[in-house]
Image (spheres, rainbow, N blue to C red):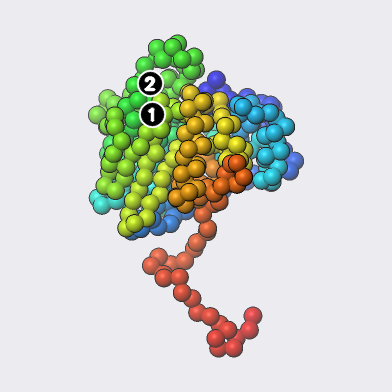
Amino acid sequence: MTYRNLLLAALISSAGIFGYSQPEGNPGLALQGPDHYSFEVGDVKVTALSDGSVPQDLHILLRGTTEAKTDALLQRSFLTNPVEASINAFLFRTEDRLVLVDTGAGEFFGPGFGDKLLSSLAAVGVAPDQITDVLLTHAHDDHMGGLVHGGKLTFPNATVHLSKADLDFFMDRENAKRTGYAMSYFDQASTALEPCIKAGKVKAFTSDGEVAPGVFAAQHPGHTPGTTFYTLRSRGEEIVFIGDIIHVAAVQAPDPEITIAYDVNPAAAAAVRREALSTFAEERTLVAVPHLSFPGVGHFRRMGSGFEWVPIAYGNREPGSDGRFADPHKNGDKH
């Protein structure tokens, strides 16, 4: 079952086919404006961009757990099933390149779900034809769907980078028969990637290394055969864009062995998650995550036998400010 079909099943199970009702215990949803949030990594401005959000029925999607265990873990984070999953993409400029990490779902999920990336880009003054590079963490619909709209290239001047392992896997429909992975995943890959391939815009890599100035790819097969982390380094600082090694922090961080229906190789995906979260926690690595609550940027820290997600601190002040501020109490002023 594809992401879109699983999403539809979640909608029907929670609200009936004609609507979605937030369960008691979760705050009601509202349509937000174009979402973007910027911060600095060394000398590089990084902007998280929202492509919207979708509800996920974790009782349908998660593997290696029970409904009772899932609900108990959600309750610790003040959540109830189904949960709302963000669809995040990330933008940054390095030297003469304007780089987009993942492209959201585009039109794949249908009206009302996703396809907000272009409005989020417009809100930060970026037109699609300004993007020079797209880095795909993997070839799933909600990461590559935004590459095309109406069959035409959304980012006509961009080179699309992805692992050759993912490209080869998803562009060969025989792999659906060999692995039992749903044919719809391969159909979606064809829809999104074939126009880019025909335009000569796809650059697939076979080994880890630098894919753009200061940006390094490292493959971590499991969720898909070519799932890739991208590390941006600048002036001694770094951020790692980790793709879908984790979908639900409230559940999979405390127990990294819990997998999800979208994993091509669940055992390998769980191993990647545990090893990566351990490294991130030990090294205090800043990470960017596609499906954790927007902006999806923060750290993992150890918590018992598992881990805990700590979102980035919010900041909103003039660029270039050194963080000092006037203290009114110095002059005896009272609040």
Q: Is residue 292 left or right of residue 124?
A: right
Amino acid at circle 2: Phe
Judge whether 237 appears above or below 266 on screen: below
Q: How far is disc 2 from disc 1 in space, using C-alphas?
A: 9 Å
Question: Where does label 1 land, which residue?
Answer: 226
Report if the CB atoms under discs 2 and 1 are less than 8 Å apart: yes
> From this viewpoint, is residue 105 visible?
no
Q: Quadrant of residue 131?
A: top left
Q: Residue at x 50, y 48 (%)?
A: 281
* Crowding near the residue tagged with mark 1, few <14, some 14–19, many ≥20 C-alpha atoms within 10 Å: many
293 above or below 325? above
* Helix, strand or loop at mark 1: loop
Percent of width and height locating residue 181: 48, 18
User: What's under tag 1, amino acid-wise?
Assistant: Gly
Quadrant in the picture for the N terminus:
top right
Which percent across, then down, holds residue 97? 27, 47
Visible residue check, residue 171: yes
- Is 69 positioned to the left or the right of 210 in the image? right
In this rendered view, identify the residue nearer to me: 271 or 326.
271
* Residue that numbered label 2 is attached to: 169
Query: In which quadrant of the rendered view does residue 261 lie?
Result: top right
Q: What is the total number of numbered labels drawn onto the structure image?
A: 2
Residue found 42% across the figure and 29% down from its top? 221
Label 2 packing within 10 angstroms: few (<14), some (14-19), many (20+) = some
The one of 216 and 273 positioned closer to us in this rendering:
273
x, y percent for residue 11: 64, 29
